[in-house]
Image (spheres, helix red, strand yellow):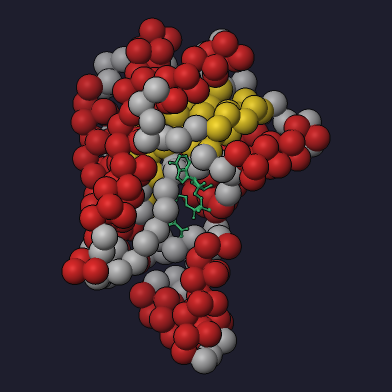
Amino acid sequence: MVEDKVMIMTGAASGIGLGIAKAFLNKGAKVVLADLDKDKLNQEVAQLKIQGFDCIAIQVDVTEENEMPQMIEETMRHYGRLDILFNNAGLQHVTPIESFSTEKFRQMVDIMLTGSFIGTKYVLPIMKEQGYGRILNMSSINGVIGFAGKAAYNSAKHGIIGLTKVAALETATEGITVNALCPGYIDTPLVRNQMEDLASHRGVSSEQVLEEVLFPLIPQKQLIDIQDVADYALFLCSDGAKSVTGQAILIDGGYTAQ
Ligand SMILES: NC(=O)c1ccc[n+]([C@@H]2O[C@H](COP(=O)([O-])OP(=O)(O)OC[C@H]3O[C@@H](n4cnc5c(N)ncnc54)[C@H](O)[C@@H]3O)[C@@H](O)[C@H]2O)c1
């Protein structure tokens, strides 16, 4: 399915990006793991190489217009082609709009939305020449519904879906598909830590926070596995998904069905 395909994953040093990169490596893809956090990235890639996977680490700040083309050129020098770009780098900050710093808002939109735009902009000439490409953009349930306290996150994640649709339309006859993945709460250290913070704040256990705060919002009453998102991403990169483009795919245990 993705054997010998070359993928760039941004935000790959941690969490979902790392988990999905591993899922693609397990299926025989060659992966460029790209992240701002050089130490964590090198540590993870060293481990993956020991396990025999074909991957490289490239430190990149997705907001830097000069670093992104360099990363893409390095990928082309090393692997000779580029089949899949996964724009995944992101971060969270929760506070009401009146106390949300404008600087923080700009930074978050810059990383999640402008970063995805820059990545897309520089891979398109290569994918068009190849007549093949898959672009996956990491949105969220917060790309389709609002959530109080998440002004920058919601703005960026909604914007990513708009970018996905435009990129899909501009590449519709070029053998390229562009889709956004919109997961709900995924079982990652980041989410588990948020549960623990909330639990210590309320003087309850993190299991109680899950039961009392999150699960009432999630019909399936469980967090999403990274593997579920990885499996969908793998499907979108398969021939069977060649007609799926410009879509925002919700993987949310029924969260947005209510
Ligand atoms: N965790 C969830 O439940 C969840 C749900 C839906 C969507 N998402 C999205 O999935 C993506 C990954 O989230 P995660 O939970 O794995 O978070 P994470 O913090 O574990 O990973 C994010 C990675 O992005 C990197 N990064 C941040 N700024 C960067 C920059 N300027 N350039 C390059 N890399 C940068 C970080 O160093 C980090 O390694 C994000 O876009 C997030 O919004 C997460």
Residue closest to the eye, 241 or 223? 223
Whole-percent x, y for residue 162 in the image: 21, 40
| Residue 71 sits above or below residue 128 on the image | below
**Quadrant in the rendering for residue 154:** bottom left
Would residue 186 appear left or right of 108 to someone viewing this image? right
| Residue 96 sits above or below residue 24 on the image | below
Quadrant into which the C terminus falls? bottom left
Residue closest to the eye, 235 or 38? 38
Residue closest to the eye, 218 or 242? 218
| Residue 230 sits above or below residue 183 on the image | above
Whole-percent x, y for residue 121 in the image: 32, 23
What residue appears at the point 21 percent right and 31 percent down from the top-left corner?
166
**Quadrant in the rendering for residue 118:** top left
Whole-percent x, y for residue 2 in the image: 57, 27
Q: Say if residue 253 shows up in the picture.
A: yes
Would residue 95 appear left or right of 78 to someone viewing this image? left
Would residue 62 appear left or right of 3 to someone viewing this image? left
Would residue 195 appear left or right of 151 to someone viewing this image? right
Quadrant into which the N terminus falls? top right
